[in-house]
Amino acid sequence: MNELDGLRAIVTGGASGIGLATARLLSERGAEVAVLDLTALDPAGLEPDGAGGAGKPLHGFLADVSDDASVRAALAEATAHLGGLDILVNNAGIGAAGTVEDNPDEQWHRVLDVNVLGMVRTTRAALPHLRASAHAAIVNTCSIAATAGLPQRALYSASKGAVLSLTLAMAADHVREGIRVNCVNPGTADTPWVGRLLDAADDPEAERAALNARQPMGRLVTAEEVAAAVAYLASPAAGSVTGTALAVDGGMAGLRLRPAGS
Ligand code: NAD
């Protein structure tokens, strides 16, 4: 008996990185999992354990979270396929670099549209299904950028700050309907996204070393570590947990270390 047996989950942005690791883990723990993403699931990702064993195949549905009609259509198709919905993981997101002077209005609209309104659209479409579930849970992928000031991340941080507040407001609105809402706050995680950032740096090795050094644990977070936190918040074991932000950040938000050796 697995802890998520019989539960049905949707993971947005589940074709890559944290979303894919989450979809795989939920499946390994017994859930039936659909992935909504702009891009199709890599066929190699179809077997959740990567080796053709324990997990069930993931179900892929194309969707753009910045397009309400696309979200509604994909969510209707996915929930029909799953036979209902118990867990929604709002994870799709995009990045932006720069200070408050650097990003044009169009980019502000685009990033807020995907990172914040994307969660609004999927949640709005999912709520009627979640209300029918005995174990309804929503987990939003927020970020360390919501709780710590990071350089060159004004727009991205504003979007994740909104996700944190949205998580709390949604938790309050839906607690009496039996729907729990929480978020995870990853530190810098070693995903294809961060791989792209490193590739674009003048000196990728030095950039990776700087990112590692910013984490009190001296290394990046793994997608699987974030997935484990999402799976906990989504599971019936977290039945009394709502309106929380769970940091998975190597200590970045909470610790104040002295320099090594001092
Ligand atoms: P990723 O780029 O590896 O994966 C993101 C996925 O989202 C991709 O599959 C992409 O196709 C999908 N996506 C993007 N825009 C979409 C849209 N409009 N509609 C549907 N799908 C869309 O990135 P990741 O690092 O796994 O990031 C996932 C989430 O984690 C994001 O919300 C990000 O903000 C958050 N996060 C990442 C880090 C990190 O360091 N990697 C840290 C904190 C938070």
Image: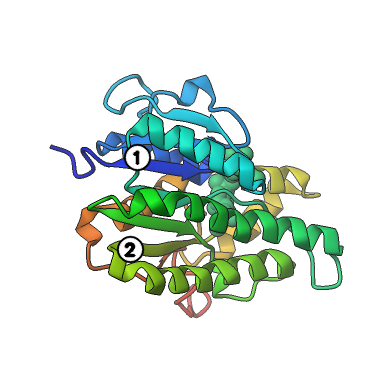
3D distance between C-alphas at marks 2 and 1: 20 Å
Q: In this view, does 98 lie to the left or right of 145?
A: right
Compared to 153, does 14 lie above or below?
above
Determine the residue positioned at 77% across, 63% down.
108
Q: Quadrant of residue 217?
A: bottom left
Determine the residue positioned at 50% across, 55% down.
124
Disc 2 + disc 1, Cβ < 8 Å:
no
Q: Name the residue under label 1.
A: 25
Q: Horizontal and vertical percent for residue 120? A: 55, 58
The crowd level at tag 1 (other Cα within 10 Å; few <14, some 14-19, many 20+) is: many
Determine the residue positioned at 41% across, 49% down.
88
Compared to 108, does 30 lie above or below?
above
Foreground residue, 98 or 118? 118
Q: Horizontal and vertical percent for residue 166? A: 51, 69
Q: In which quarter of the image is the N terminus?
A: top left
Q: Indicate the amino acid at tag 1.
A: Leu
Q: Residue 223 carries which label?
A: none
Regarding residue 16, the answer to whether it shows in the image is no
Q: Quadrant of residue 48?
A: top left
Q: Indicate the amino acid at tag 2.
A: Arg
Q: Reading the chain from its start, which is encountered first: label 2 or label 1?
A: 1
Foreground residue, 147 or 168? 168
Q: Name the residue under label 2.
A: 180
Q: Is residue 101 left or right of residue 197?
A: right
Q: Nearer the viewer, mark 2 or mark 1?
A: 2
